[in-house]
Amino acid sequence: MLKFAVFDEDGPARAWPLRHAHLIGPDDIPVPAEIDFEKGEIRCQKSSSGAAALCLLFDSGANGDLMLQTCLLPERERPYLLSLELARHRIMLFLNKLEEWLHCELSPEDEAMTLFERARGAFTTALTADRTPEGTYSPEQVRLARESLRLAIDASERLALLVAEHTLARRLGAPANANGLANAPIGCVVRPAQGGEALQRIVRESFDFLVAPMRWTDLEPSEGEYAFTQTDKWIEWAARTAKMPVMGGPLIDLRPGCTPDWLGIWDNDYETLREVVYGHLKQVVGRYRKAVNRWVVGSGLHLNTSFSLTLEHLMDLTRICVMVVRKMQPNAKIYLEIDQPFGEHYAAHPSSAPPLLYAEMVSQHGLSIDAFALRVQMGGGMAGRATRDMMQLSAMLDAYSQFDKPLIVSAMGAPSTPPPAATDDADADAEDPGPDRSTRDPGYWRGPWSPESQAEWLMHALTIALGKPYVQSVAWSDLYDSPPGADCDDMPGAGLISGEGRAKPAMHRMAQIRRAMRDRTPPTRIIRASAPPEETAI
């Protein structure tokens, strides 16, 4: 059993929320485990032997309420100090990335290194500090461990941004493409039900391409009866009036709420489901192939939450999605989308596939895709949307670059308001990614979610993504906030424009970054500037 001692201001904690807590084994693959809290300790009972790491949402002070993890640890009778082990992992991550990114060539006077050395010093002092007469961790050890963690997170985020600035400088120095872009187009997802001249003007002036969602449940609400009208409007406008590139899809999205109810009757009949998927792909691609030249052919297939599919079925569906579109439109760009790329869903749903393993299998099968597409959404009260810091984002992107395929970020997003209050209903429990199914708390980055924190998150996350030479494009997940309870809401409050029609600070930050990229100026200069602007009417 793995045990972790946790403390509050009064000593050993009397209660501790196990928010999104799960164990991770080698290769960052979650492992099934029973995790509970008892008498000041988090206790993790796993069925397999070997070392494991604990990952959970943790209040790291000024850095935010973040998903953090320990190193791989062997079982022992004496509990580990959770905050100390979280700091140990972050220090290790900093050193590994420093060597990988800069080959350890960073001046000791750099602010990231100064903070790191302070973090390492606090960690060493905490590690060697005297315990209490009873042999338990002392308040001073707890304080030093938390201080080390805070400093290490800050240092690692600064390192990630520094590297992004260096790589962006090289990217911005490369020849521009035919549209005058420095090989890094920025787009936005536009919901079919949202329209009007004002939104069209914003899309045309603020983005390089648009993403047209094509949820199966919207396009074919009743079997055999297609409803293309709303999707037609945006695609026709982009192709004929705005002359903008369009990315269509996902075409086959098996995430909850994205498939029509009538499709569920084929849950236990894979051969029929396969035929229906084949026919739907032909119908949609056949309609839009003259206007859409980039397709997200599948999404959420590895999550396996809507149907009872085997791994062989998942790979077969993936192959069909790629094959049909490639055959119908040989010159189109084909992307395969990976939702929940950090992979915590596998801890609670072993019938799913770990995302990195899924990406590896796609590569090994030789499927003809042009890039992997990643959904990078944080701060939403649904599965897979827990908040990570910028170093974790940067490291995750690096992990998916190992398959020798370019990446696109097909849906980057964070909310401008905290998520709705947690519920205990069965529907929420069914989608919870970890053993603590009583909470939907996704945490936050640096401060509770607000229009201002959304803008700051966008600015940092977009800079990190654009700073990766293998990332070909980035799209924001929502242009406009949908009404509360709207079926299309993937993450409420993530729009760049509020439901009242006012441009949020994030909209202004997006425009600044896109302008900086066109002017070949690293966006990191904007990060060092003043506070974001306020909301304005559009």
Image (cartoon, helix red, strand yellow):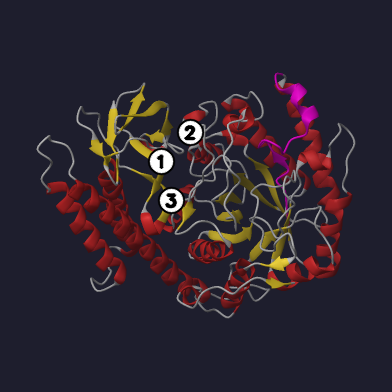
Depth check: 153 or 223 in front? 153
For disc 3, the marked residue is 65
Depth check: 224 or 3 in front? 3
Give, as a single range, the part of the protein colored magenta: 247-268
Q: Secondary structure at mark 3?
A: strand
Q: Quadrant of residue 3?
A: top left
- Identify which residue is drawn at 24% across, 52% down: 143
Q: Does the CB distance between marks 2 and 3 fall below 8 Å?
A: no
- Identify which residue is drawn at 48% across, 44% down: 342
Task: Indicate the position of residue 226 as horizontal and vertical percent values.
Answer: 88, 40
In the displayed structure, 224 sits above or below 449; it is above
Could you tell whether 117 is left or right of 325 in the image? Answer: left
Number of numbered callouts drawn: 3
Q: Secondary structure at mark 2?
A: loop
Q: What kind of residue is marked 3?
A: Asp
Picture disc at residue 56:
1
Q: Secondary structure at mark 1?
A: strand
Q: Residues within 10 Å of mark 2 (few under 14, many from 20)?
A: many
In the displayed structure, 129 sits above or below 221; it is below
Q: Is residue 338 found inside the magenta-colored segment of the image?
A: no
Compare marks 1 and 2 and give the one earlier in the sequence: 1
Could you tell whether 156 is left or right of 171 in the image? Answer: left
For disc 2, the marked residue is 434
In the displayed structure, 352 sits above or below 403; it is above
Q: Nearer the viewer, mark 3 or mark 1?
A: 3
Compare marks 2 and 3 and give the one earlier in the sequence: 3
Depth check: 56 or 218 in front? 56
Mark 2–mark 3 distance (CA, rounded to whole Å): 17 Å
Task: Indicate the position of residue 264 as horizontal and vertical percent values.
Answer: 75, 25
Q: Is residue 248 found inside the magenta-colored segment of the image?
A: yes
